[in-house]
Image (tube, coloured by chain):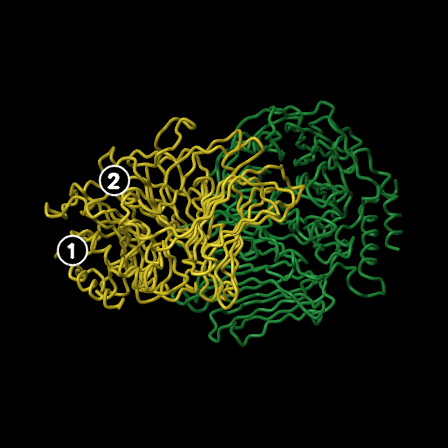
Chain colours: A green, B yellow
Amino acid sequence: MVQLQFTLLLSILSSFTGLAAAKAGDIGTASNVQDNDKLRPQFHLTPGKGWMNDPDGLWYDRKEKLWHAYYQHNPDHNIWNSPISWGHSVSPDLVSWYYYGNALTPEDSSIGFFSGSIVVDRNNTSGFFDDSVDPDQRVVAMYTKNTDKETQELAYSKDGGFEWEYYSQNPVININTAQQRDPKIIWHEDSQKWVALIARTQKFAIQIWTSKDLKNWEHVSDFEKEGILGFQYEMPGLLKLPVENPSKGDGKTHKWVMFVALHPGSPIGGPLNQYFIGDFDGETFTPDDHATRIQDYGRDYYSFTTFDSANPADGPNLGLAWATNWQYATIVPTENYRSSMTQVRNYTLRNVDYNPEYTDLTLIQTPVLETYETKQNESLKTWTQTQEYSKNNFDLDSSSTVNTNFNGHNNASGVLDFNMTFVITSGKGWSDGLSPFTITINSDQVNGKSDNISVTFDASGQTWVVDRTTTHAFQRNQHEFGERMGQYVNPRGYRDTGAYYSVYGFVDRSMLELYFNDGEMTMTNTFFLADGRVPADITVNCGFDDSFIHVEEFKAKAYALKSNVNVDNRNPFEKAADDVKELIEKLLPSKSNN
Amino acid sequence: MVQLQFTLLLSILSSFTGLAAAKAGDIGTASNVQDNDKLRPQFHLTPGKGWMNDPDGLWYDRKEKLWHAYYQHNPDHNIWNSPISWGHSVSPDLVSWYYYGNALTPEDSSIGFFSGSIVVDRNNTSGFFDDSVDPDQRVVAMYTKNTDKETQELAYSKDGGFEWEYYSQNPVININTAQQRDPKIIWHEDSQKWVALIARTQKFAIQIWTSKDLKNWEHVSDFEKEGILGFQYEMPGLLKLPVENPSKGDGKTHKWVMFVALHPGSPIGGPLNQYFIGDFDGETFTPDDHATRIQDYGRDYYSFTTFDSANPADGPNLGLAWATNWQYATIVPTENYRSSMTQVRNYTLRNVDYNPEYTDLTLIQTPVLETYETKQNESLKTWTQTQEYSKNNFDLDSSSTVNTNFNGHNNASGVLDFNMTFVITSGKGWSDGLSPFTITINSDQVNGKSDNISVTFDASGQTWVVDRTTTHAFQRNQHEFGERMGQYVNPRGYRDTGAYYSVYGFVDRSMLELYFNDGEMTMTNTFFLADGRVPADITVNCGFDDSFIHVEEFKAKAYALKSNVNVDNRNPFEKAADDVKELIEKLLPSKSNN
C-alpha cells in the first residue's frame, strides 16, 4: 500500500529527472519516515539510504519556497565508498526532508564529486541561463572533482535543482594539486563579485578567489595557519552576520565570520569546526584577533555550511553541519543509512560578557524548527506537539519531582525537547566537592527495560557533562565512541543570588543537540539506544537535601510527525507516506502538472 | 620501625627548617613509599599528604645536585582549600621525590600564596645574598599573593631552598587587580635582564615585565588573545629551545616557545596547555604564525612549568605538569593525597613532516627517568628494572601472542613501560571499516579478578584511543571522568609499505603517559584500578586473521623501587625507608653535620 502510493508518486516525479539525476526508484521518498528504524532522526536530514557525509550546495528556492540540500553521498553503500556523488533532498519547512537520490554523479566510479556549494545566479552573470529560467532558480554548483588531482568544476540547473548540466569548459580552477577542495561561493555585494573560499587542505590555507561570471577566477589572498591545524583544513565558509547587540561592542552592526573545519586532529577527538571574526573587503579577510573559537563542543558536528540566498535583508543566516564523527561514522549501528545532519540553525553574533574584564563577540546558534516563511502556514507543518510538561519557580533538591512521564512512557515518537532556566543560589567552590544535578532522558521500555542518557550540571566547576552511555553493544564495544564529555559553560548572566543558565535540548531518537544560554554555546552528540528503544520522557534529579539551584522554568514537549498522531487505523508510516504525497503535490505544482 | 627511622631522620633535618618551613613532622619523607596506597604513582612527584595543584618554582641546585619542586599545597586537606601554600619536595634523580611539607605559608589562612617561580640569582642582582651563600643556591621566588586582589611578591632562601625569608618591600608588582597571577621568571642573556611572564587571566593576555634586580619591574609588552581562550589564561612560560634538525627547517638552531595554560574551557574538557613558537627580543614575543598548538592531548596535563638553571649550555630543558583535571581533581579516589605531577620531561623542538606540503616545528617531549648528571651514578638510582620482555619482527594478527606475563602476574610493583614500533603493511581506508589492534595493560588479580585499561590503534583513521575504563566505582559513577579518548596521530614516517609509528608508554599505578613517535605527541591520562589492583603486565591483540601491521619491535619492562626487589625479609616499605635515609644523608651532608 505504501509502496503503491510511492510508486505512483515517483512515476510522476521521475519525468522531471534528467541524465545527471537519480534513478527513478530512489527519488521523492520522505527519508525520515521511510523505514521503521528507531535510530533514524525524524526531524533531521538523513539520506533515504546509503552513505552521507559533508553537506554541499545548500540553497533556497524562493519561487517554490523549497529548501534544497545536496551532500556527499553513495546510495549503494552505508560506508564511505567510491563513487562519491552529490545526493539531493528537499524540505518545505527545514524539518521534514524528502530524498531524491543522486543529483550529480561522476561519469566513472574512480572519480569523486567532492564537496562544494551552490549559488543562485539571479543576474545570469554566468550566461548559463535565459529568460525561461526564473531568476530564483538559476542555480550554479561548484564542486571538487577528485581524480589523481583535485580541480573545481561547475554544473548548473534550469529546473530548480533537479536536473543538472555540466559546464563544457570544466575545470574552472586547476592548480595541479591533489589537495585543493570544498569551494564555498558567496556573492560580495560591495565589490559586486563572486567570492570563492577553497581549502588548500594540507598547506593549512583558505584560498580566496574572486570572479565576475563564476567561470573565470582570480586567486586574490590566503587566510592561513590560524587556529587548530589538525591533519587538514576542509569546508571553509564566510558569512556577514548581524550583531544582536552592537551597542555592547564596538557599535558595528555586522561582522564577517570565517569558518574553517579541520579533520582529523581536533582536541575534542576527530573533526572540529572553528570560526574567526573580522572584516572582509572582498579580497582579504582580516581577523580582529588570533583567538581560536570553537563552533560546537560536541563530538558530532563537522563540515558546517550555509544556505545560499536564504538571507534577503537581515533574514536568517541558516546552516547545518554533518552530525557524526569520522572516528566512528562508518561503523555506527544504523542499518539503512549513515548519517544525519544537525538541525538547521540560524547564525548570528552577540557580544557576550565572559567576565568583568572581557566581552567577546560570540557566534550564536538558534534551532530553526520551521522557517520564518513557513511558520505561519499551518498546512505545511509536518509535525505536531503531542504533550507538554512544565514546572516553574522551585528549589531543586532531593525531594523535587520533575518527571514529564509523556504518554505514560509508551508510544513514544522519540522526539522531545526541553528548556530549563535556573539560578545558582548558594556558592559552591572546589573546596565543597562537586555539586551536580542531572537531566535524564529516559527511553520507553522494550523487553521490560528502559535505557537513558543524561546531561549533568556541576555548579562548582560550572561544567556540563553529556553522558551518552547506553547499553547498546555498539557503544559498549567501540573504544572510539567516547561516551562522557564535560565542558565549562560561561553563565548566561547573573541574578542577585548568583549565576544563571538556560539550556535548550532537542532530542531526536539518536541525536541530542544542546543550546546553552540562548545559543551562546552548543554541543551536538549522537547516541544509540539498544533494542529499538526511543527517547520517551525526561526527569530532573538532584541528590542533595539542601538545594543550591532555583529553577525558574522547566518546560518539555513531545513531538511527532503529524502522521504519528494516531487518529486513524493507518500505521504511522502509512500516514506519513500520505502526508508526504500531499506535501510534494502542494509544493511542486508545476511539476505534477507537467 | 619505619616510624623510628624517620623520626630520627626528621629530627636531624628539622634543625635546618626556619619560620617559613614546614612542621618538622611533615618533612623529609619519601612520598612515593610513604603509604601502602596502591593508587599512588611510585616514579612521580606526589605530595606526602593532602592537596597539590600547580607546580611552582622548579629549580636545580648544582651544588648539592638536588632537584627542587614547590607546588600549590594544603597538607591538611585532600581537596583545594585555604590556606594554599607552597609545598616542597626534592629529588636526587627526578624519579624519587622526598616530601618536606610547606615551604612558603601565608601568615593568615584567608591569604593564598598562589603560583609562581624560582630563579637562581647567581650574580646576586637582587642584593639578597652575600658571599656566604653559594651562587648555585641563591634562590629567589616570586609568587602571587591572593587576597581581595593579586600582587606579586618575593621570597628568598640562603640555605638551598629550605628556609625562606620574605622581601621587606613586598609586593614588587601591584596593578590593583584580582586577576594577575602565576609569574614565571627567566634570565634573558642577550639583554642581561630578568623577564617575568604574568597572566592577566581574564583579559587573556600574557604580560611581559623586565627587571635588572628582581625587585623593580617594568611592564614592556603583552602577548594576547592567541589560541584557545577558555575561561582564563594561567601559568605562562617562555623557553629558548634547541631545534633537533635545523636543516629541515629554516636553519635556525633555537627558537623561543611561549606556553599558555587555560582553564577551564578546553575542547578536551577542563584545562589545556598550548604553545606558540616564535622569536623573543627580550621585550616582545612574536609568534611565527597564529596556529594553536596543543602540548598534550590527554585529559591530565595542566600548568606545565620548567626547572630554572637546569640548562647550562644545551643541556636538558626539563619541566613537568600537574597530572589531573580540575573537572575531577578534587574527587579522585586517592585517600592520602591528591594529585601527582607528570614525569619530568625534556623539551626540544623538531621539524616534523606532516604531509608532503607541510613541515612544522613541533614541541618534543622525552621522559627523563634519570637526569644526565645522575644517570652514571649507580648509587643514586632508587629504582631497578625487574623483568624484560621483547618480541621483534613479526606480523601482528589473531594468532600472534604478545604477553609479557611479568612475575606470573603476581607481586607487581605497578610500574611498567613499553616501546612499540610498527609499520602499516596493507592500505586501509574508511571504506574498509576500522582496522584496530589493542595494547592492554592488565592488573594483578585481587579477589580472583583482574582489571585493565587499553590503548587501541585504528589503522584506517590513524587514530589512537585510550580506554581507561575500569571497574572502580569512582570511575563508573562520575560523569565527569570521561574514559575513552581518541586522537589522530601523524605517522613518524614512512617505510616502503606504509606509515610507521612508535609509541612509548610509561605506566605508574594510576597514570599512563604515552609518547608517540619519539615525543612528537603525548597523551597523559590518569586511571583508577579497583580493590588495590596495580598494573602487572601487557598483552597486544589483533582480531584479524590477515595482518595489516608488521611489528618491528615490541619491548616491555617492569620496574620497582630498589627496595622492592625482594632480597631480604624487610617488606618493601621498610626497605624503601632505609634507602631514603641513606640517600638523604648522602645528598645533604652539610646539613646532617650541622
Q: What's the amino acid at mark 1?
A: Lys
In the rendered image, residue A279, in percent from the top left (x then y), is placed at 50, 36
Q: Residue furthest front?
A: B568
Q: Is residue B8 above or below residue A324?
A: below
- Residue occupying image coordinates x 60% and y 30%: A180
Vertical order, B317 against A517 (above or below): above
Residue A312 location (% of width, % of height) = 65, 41
Judge whether B120 appears above or below B11 on screen: above
Q: Residues within 10 Å of mark 1 (few under 14, many from 20)?
A: some
Mark 2 highlights which residue? B187
Residue A359 makes an appearance in the image: no
Residue pictured at 21% horizontal, 53% vertical:
B586
In the image, B277: left or right of B185?
A: right
Whole-percent x and y of residue A514? 58, 56
Horizontal and vertical percent position of residue B300 = 43, 53
Query: Would residue B53 be found to the left or right of residue A200 on screen?
Result: left
Which of the 4 quarters of the picture holds residue A443?
Answer: bottom right
The first of marks 2 and 1 along the sequence is 2
**Regarding mark 1 in the picture, which secondary structure is present there?**
helix
